[in-house]
Amino acid sequence: MTTLYDTLGVQAHATDEEIKRAYRKAAMKWHPDRNHGAEDVARAAFQEIKDAYAILSDAEQRKVYDAVYAEQMRHWEAQRARQQHAQAQRAAAARAADEAAYAEMVSVAIRFADEGHNRDVLFGVLLGRQCEPRRAAQIADSVAALQASRRAAAKAGEAGDASHATDSAHAVDTAKDADMRPEADVFAVKNAARDASAHRGKHANHANHAKQDEPTADAHPAGALGGLWFQFLNSLRF
């Protein structure tokens, strides 16, 4: 908003002397006689300079102008604030509508991607729903990349689950072997003891048979001599 002070090129708190010097300088610059070929423009500017100086050089008129100008400024500021607020609301509404439309297009693309369609199909579907081509391409690329990433992660997860199941089964078998080993060791010890006992029994039986097969004389020397003496007496009797 241009003011009379702006026309003369001075500040609103300028002194009377500053206003006078500014008027003389501006008048010389825009005098029609000094602007050949642009007399009409210079004449209009020169008239505005004269009107501004006529008001600002008079103390009473300057006071009234300042009061009126201040009131106008308040109204102008209020009007500008209302305009800015309304513009901000319109911008917010437009942004919200755009975000909603974008979210809807993304949702549509994801639904078709989940059904197994590729990027080109997604792009065509979005164009068919009146989506701007550049945005449709961006959404199609993003959703297709996301879907590929999800599938790769799912495959990696399945492979990890299978490996984990194999490892778990091996761990179970190892645990079973470890649990059965002590029992097998006990059985081995029992079998060894039984074999040793049987061997000792066989050895004892063999020794007993050997003793039974030996002559009585060999077993008891005194008994053997008695037997010989008995035979000698019998021989004498007959």
Image (spheres, rainbow, N blue to C red):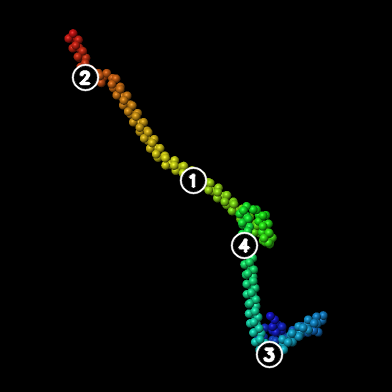
Let me know if residue 17 appears in the view: no
Let me know if residue 43 appears in the view: yes
Q: Which one is in front in this view, the residue at disc 4 or the one at disc 2?
A: 4
**Which residue corresponds to mark 2?**
222
Give the spatial CA distance, label 1 vs label 2: 80 Å
Q: Which amino acid does label 2 sit on?
A: Ala
Location of residue 167 in the rendering, given as x and y in whole percent from the top left corner: 50, 45
Question: Residue 56, located in which quarter of the rendered image?
Answer: bottom right
Give the spatial CA distance, label 4 vs label 1: 44 Å
Check if mark 4's residue and mark 2's residue have beta carbons within 8 Å.
Answer: no
**Which residue corresponds to mark 4?**
103
Q: Which one is in front in this view, the residue at disc 1 or the one at disc 2?
A: 1
**Which residue corresponds to mark 1?**
168
Q: Nearer the viewer, residue 208 or 219?
A: 208
Q: Which one is in front in this view, the residue at disc 3 or the one at disc 1?
A: 1
Picture residue at 23% right of the left edge, 19% below the top: 221
**Which residue corresponds to mark 3?**
61
Q: What residue type is labelled 4?
A: Ala
- Vertical position of residue 24 compared to residue 236: above or below: below
Mark 3 or mark 1, which has the lower sequence index?
3
Mark 1 secondary-structure assignment: helix
Mark 2 or mark 3, which has the lower sequence index?
3
Label 1, residues with CA under 10 Å away: few <14, some 14-19, many ≥20:
few
Mark 2 secondary-structure assignment: helix
